[in-house]
Every structure is written in structure tokens, then in C-alpha cells.
Image: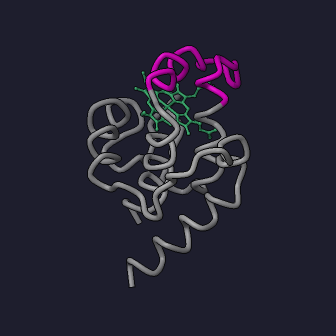
């Protein structure tokens, strides 16, 4: 059951903006690396966004967002774009993420805490 839902979400990320500029990449993996995503989340996201990505005060909740939206926001922060009043906090963290990290973490935060 979980596997089927996860695959549906992955497909929606693929059709989103995330892969628009990575079409030359021949080795895009078919499923996300949950362990890698979990490691990133524990190390560099949950201190601000919460154990279950539920958010707190000025840190937005992530768990109820769409993977494609999360990926787009992370790419914008990684590019140094200022989105809200506290973007500087996100920009420094997003700059360390690879395309693969973003794909993994976007699906992970949107699906792991249902
Ligand atoms: C130092 C605290 C901090 C850390 C660590 C952090 N964030 Fe954030 N995050 C924020 C803040 C604050 C915002 C709102 C920024 C703004 O005003 O633009 C935000 C915004 C976001 C958004 C956009 C939400 C929306 O509704 O548009 C996403 C997605 C996100 N963070 C994901 C992550 C992920 C994934 C990680 C781990 C790689 C992470 N964040 C690490 C503080 C943090």
C-alpha cells in the first residue's frame, strides 16, 4: 500500500519542474533513497522544521506540501533567491543539496510523516 502511494508521488515529482533542466541526465533513479533522505532530514532539517516536519512559529510546516512544490522551493533557495523574510536560513542549507538530495528529501518530507 505504502509502496504504491510512494511511486505515485515520485511520478508527480518527475512531471514537475524538478527534472525540467536535468533531461541530459541519463541515470535518474526510479525510486527515492529513503535512507539518504532520512539522514539529511535528521542532520539538517528537523532542528528547524520539527521532528515530523510539522513546523513551529516562523518555521513553515513541510509535511502537508506537495513534493514537486518542495523541490521547486529548495531549488529557488539553492539559487540564492529570497522568498520570505527568513530565506537566508534556508539558502545556506539548500546550497549544500545536490539535485539527487532535493529529489529524495522532497518526497521524503511529504510522505514520511502521514
Ligand atoms: C535554520 C533553520 C532551518 C533549517 C535548518 C532548514 N530550514 Fe527550511 N525553512 C526555514 C525557514 C525560516 C523558512 C522560511 C524562509 C523564508 O522566509 O523564505 C524555510 C522554508 C522552507 C521551505 C519552503 C516552505 C514553503 O512553504 O514555501 C522548504 C521546502 C524547506 N524550508 C525545506 C527544508 C529542508 C528540506 C531542510 C533540510 C535540508 C530545511 N528546510 C532546513 C528554516 C530552516
Q: Taking 71 as reference, is 61 left or right?
A: left
Residue 81 image position (x, y, % from top left): 69, 20
Q: In which quadrant of the rendered image does the C terminus lie?
A: bottom left
In this picture, is 78 found above or below 102?
Answer: above
**Image side of residue 98 versus residue 38, left or right:** right
Point out the stretch of residues depicted in magenta: 76-96
**Between 63 and 72, which is closer to the camera in this rendering?**
72
Q: Is residue 79 magenta?
A: yes
Residue 82: image location, x then y, percent: 69, 18
Residue 110, position in %: x, y?
A: 49, 57
Q: Is residue 49 above or below residue 33?
A: above
Image point (54%, 57%), residue name: 64
Q: Residue at x 71, y 40 (%)?
A: 21
Q: How is the image coloured?
A: one colour
Toward the bottom, the furthest residue is 1
- Is residue 32 shown left or right of residue 73? left
The location of residue 111, given as percent across then percent down, is 44, 62
Q: Quadrant of residue 72?
A: top right
Q: How many marks?
A: 0
Looking at the image, residue 92 lies above or below residue 76: above
Q: Is residue 41 magenta?
A: no
Q: Which residue sits at x=42%, y=37%?
A: 49
Name the foreground residue: 54 vs 107: 107
39, 31: nearer the viewer: 31
Q: Residue at x 39, y 85 (%)?
A: 1
Q: Is residue 54 above or below residue 91?
A: below
In this view of the protein, which residue sits in the foreground, 11 or 28? 28
Amino acid at each position: 500500500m505504502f509502496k504504491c502511494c510512494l511511486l505515485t508521488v515520485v511520478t508527480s515529482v518527475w512531471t514537475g519542474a524538478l527534472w525540467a533542466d536535468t533531461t541530459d541526465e541519463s541515470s535518474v533513479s526510479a525510486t527515492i533513497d529513503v535512507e539518504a533522505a532520512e539522514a539529511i532530514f535528521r542532520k539538517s532539517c528537523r532542528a528547524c522544521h520539527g521532528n515530523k516536519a510539522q513546523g513551529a512559529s516562523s518555521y513553515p510546516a513541510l509535511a502537508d506540501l506537495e513534493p514537486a512544490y518542495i523541490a521547486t522551493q529548495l531549488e529557488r533557495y539553492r539559487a540564492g533567491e529570497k522568498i520570505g523574510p527568513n530565506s537566508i536560513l534556508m539558502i545556506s542549507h539548500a546550497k549544500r543539496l545536490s539535485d539527487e538530495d532535493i529529489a529524495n528529501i522532497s518526497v521524503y518530507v511529504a510522505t514520511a510523516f502521514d
